[in-house]
Image: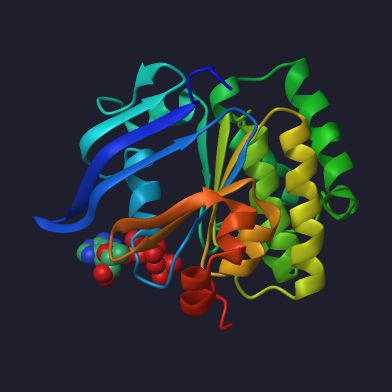
Amino acid sequence: SNAAPLLKVSSLGAGYGGMPVLREVSLEVDKAEIVALVGSNGAGKTTLLRALSRVIGSTGTIEFAGRDLSPMTPDEAFGAGLVQVPEGRQLFDRMTVEDNLLMGAYRRGAGRAIGRDLERIYGLFPRLGERRRQLAGSLSGGEQQMCAMARGLMAAPVLLMIDEMSLGLAPVVVEQLMEVLAAIRKDGVTILLVEQDVHLALSGADRGYVMETGRIVHHGAAKDLIDDPEVRRAYLGL
Ligand code: ATP
């Protein structure tokens, strides 16, 4: 398409205490795309998400929905619709499922739209609807991941960034979550899927970026990356 990308990252650099982790990272995400960001443990994927969320500073430029993200605080970036589902879910274990979901909407204030969104999200995740009064800490791993994704959705994201969605979950559960992602995208939400499971992420994505030691080393249509001999050798064990 000839529309401007929703997210445009150019020559991004970031690190910790003067130690560079990301180098010259450039990537684009279009509206309503599912884009996979994949790479091994320690490649820098979470660091990139932290820079996008403005939890850490960065050099280079980040444009999001036509705005410069660089000077924003994490709360401002969140308010602009950049919402992260963190690795490890990070739920409020001693709160109910529903209260966790409402925490996702804290910035939106009270209102009728919140109740509507709760019902819509319980439609996407019927198990959460059944367990809305249950403490989040007592959910199964898969249900906790659903709850974390649902909490992210309650923030009315423009771009939902999901870090290691599949970690520790059974394949059948992961398959259900991938179906939910497809449904979410149909509703117009753009998704950045950050995964160590390269095959899984590329199977569910339109396009992908492969990261190694803080750089993007391959990118393209997800189906082309799955067929790329180098990607197959390095990441797919083929
Ligand atoms: P994983 O999926 O295991 O989190 P990743 O691709 O997300 O891997 P990062 O977590 O971004 O990788 O880590 C990239 C590099 O940055 C690693 O060398 C890591 O040790 C380093 N790093 C990450 N967080 C910090 C931190 N808070 N302080 C210092 N170094 C860090």
Q: Residue at x 74, y 38 (%)?
A: 184
Say which of 183 and 55 sits in front.
Answer: 183
Residue 221 percent across, percent down from the top left: 58, 48
Residue 156 percent across, percent down from the top left: 63, 28
Outermost residue toward the left? 18
Quarter of the view holding residue 167: bottom right
Ligand 1 lies in quarter: bottom left
Residue 148 percent across, percent down from the top left: 64, 51
> Quick check: 4 left or right of 127?
left
Outermost residue toward the bottom? 237
Number of marks in the image? 0
Quarter of the view holding residue 199: bottom right
> Quick check: 211 left or right of 113?
left
Q: Is residue 58 above or below residue 234?
A: above
Q: Residue at x 30, y 46 (%)?
A: 25
Q: Is residue 205 above or below residue 26?
A: below
Asked if residue 95 shows in the view, the reply is: no
Asked if residue 225 shows in the view, the reply is: yes
> Quick check: 187 left or right of 227?
right
Say which of 108 and 152 sits in front.
Answer: 152
Q: Residue at x 28, y 66 (%)?
A: 213
Q: What's the coloring here?
A: rainbow
> Quick check: 11 left or right of 207?
left
Residue 104 percent across, percent down from the top left: 60, 37
Say which of 33 and 93 sits in front.
Answer: 33
Looking at the rendering, in which quadrant would you find the N terminus?
A: top right
Quarter of the view holding residue 139: bottom right
Looking at the rendering, in which quadrant would you find the C terminus?
A: bottom right
